[in-house]
Image (cartoon, rainbow, N blue to C red):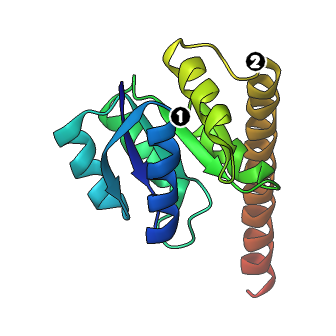
Amino acid sequence: MHRAMVVHESWMIREILKVQLADSNCHVVYSARSRLEARISYRLHKPDIVFVDATQNVNRGHHIIQDLVDLDPMAAVVAMVNPDGDTAALHALVHGARGFMTISSSSSVIQQEIKRILEDKPQCPTLAKTMEQQVAGRFRFVLRRLAGWRGWARRDATESR
């Protein structure tokens, strides 16, 4: 039986996930609702796998994922996303999640995901490569914007004299 931790701000979703994980032969050792609670409970309980809601509005799920990966680089973190949550899944994978699945997944899908994550199989190598390219492209775009803004600020300073 695997030990799991659930991080979600909604009490109802945490309880639903507990039932689904129990059906998938997982014991939920703790269910956290905030970033701080997740960090503390991860240190105390050392679960085999952690399910984090990557779509959280208040706690920013990708920050929670990054915190857990910073605590333990080998942490098996699965991001829970909405069915149309492509950007949330990308952010989660960039910040260190080993995989993602929809919040409304069935127990059999959860069981397959747990097996895949704990066996260290990559979810989609081409997706990871695409994400790296997107992040690098976004970084170049931001640098260009900053360089343009600095030039614009210099022009304003010289024109005002």
The answer to which of marks 2 and 1 sits earlier in the sequence is 1
Kind of residue indicated by mark 1: Gly
> Residue 11: x percent and y percent?
43, 70
> Between residues 124 and 80, which one lies in front from this camera angle?
80
Q: Within 10 angstroms of label 2, few (less than 14), some, or many (20 or more) residues? A: few
Residue 136 vertical placement versus 159 (above, below): above
Q: CA distance from mark 2 to mark 1?
A: 14 Å
Q: Is residue 117 visible?
A: yes
Which secondary structure, mark 1?
A: loop
- The residue that mark 1 highlights is 96
> Between residues 47 and 75, which one lies in front from this camera angle?
47
Q: Is residue 10 visible?
A: no
Kind of residue indicated by mark 2: Pro
Asked whether the beta carbons under mark 2 and mark 1 sit within 8 Å of each other, the answer is no
In the image as oriented, which residue stretches furthest toward the bottom? 160
Residue 153 vertical placement versus 110 (above, below): below
Residue shown at the point (72%, 79%) measured from the top left? 157
21 lies left or right of 112: left
> Residue 102: x percent and y percent?
70, 48
> Residue 56: x percent and y percent?
56, 65
115 lies left or right of 4: right
Q: Within 10 angstroms of label 1, few (less than 14), some, or many (20 or more) residues? A: many
Residue 42 figure quarter = top left
- The residue that mark 2 highlights is 125
> Between residues 78 and 93, which one lies in front from this camera angle?
78
Residue shown at the point (36%, 64%) measured from the top left? 34
28 lies left or right of 11: left
The quadrant the N terminus occupies is top left
Residue shown at the point (70%, 45%) measured from the top left? 89
